[in-house]
Image: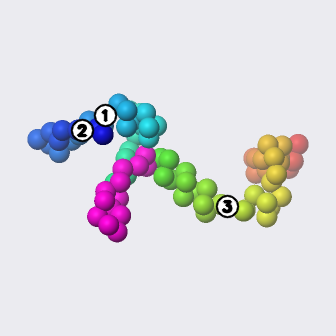
């Protein structure tokens, strides 16, 4: 268990152990959300955005024929230069 104190301005210092656990670094944003049971959860907002993007794009790579790094590079080249290299 970790304990943090709230300053007069409502600021908290996230304990080092929790920062490491969430992969937080200076300048990162954190996300607070409340579960239906009232519990409040804290997450790394950047990581949460990546997870949402992964969910949104799940299965798309297979649909468009992207199977490995070479396919990704070909797609990037096509977008950048209008052709595959």
Residue 45 visible in the displayed image: yes
Q: Answer whether residue 34 is magenta in the image.
A: yes
Secondary structure under tag 2 reads loop
* Of the image marks 3 and 1, the number of the one nearer the N terminus: 1
The residue sitting at the left extreme is 8
Q: CA distance from mark 2 to mark 1?
A: 7 Å
* Of the image marks 2 and 3, the number of the one nearer the N terminus: 2
Q: Is residue 28 left or right of residue 75?
A: left
Q: Is residue 22 left or right of residue 67?
A: left
Q: CA distance from mark 3 to mark 1?
A: 34 Å
Q: Nearer the viewer, mark 2 or mark 3?
A: 2
Q: Residues within 10 Å of mark 1 (few under 14, many from 20)?
A: few
Q: Are marks 2 and 3 in contact (CB under 8 Å)?
A: no
Q: Is residue 70 left or right of residue 45?
A: right
Q: Which residue is mark 1?
A: 15
Secondary structure under tag 1 reads loop
Residue 77 visible in the displayed image: no
44 shown above or below 64: above
Q: Which residue is mark 3?
A: 58
Q: Which residue is mark 2?
A: 3
The spot of residue 5 in percent (x, y) is 18, 38
- Screen quadrant of the C terminus: top right
Residues in magenta?
Answer: 33-45
The spot of residue 50 in percent (x, y) is 55, 51
The spot of residue 71 in percent (x, y) is 83, 48
């Amino acid at each position: 268990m970790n304990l943090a104190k709230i300053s007069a301005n409502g600021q908290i210092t996230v304990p080092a152990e929790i920062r490491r656990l969430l992969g937080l670094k200076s300048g990162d944003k954190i996300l607070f959300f409340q579960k239906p049971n009232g519990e409040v959860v804290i997450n790394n907002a950047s990581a949460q955005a990546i997870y949402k993007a992964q969910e949104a794009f799940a299965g798309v790579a297979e649909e468009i024929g992207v199977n490995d790094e070479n396919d990704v590079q070909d797609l990037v080249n096509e977008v950048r230069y209008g052709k595959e290299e």
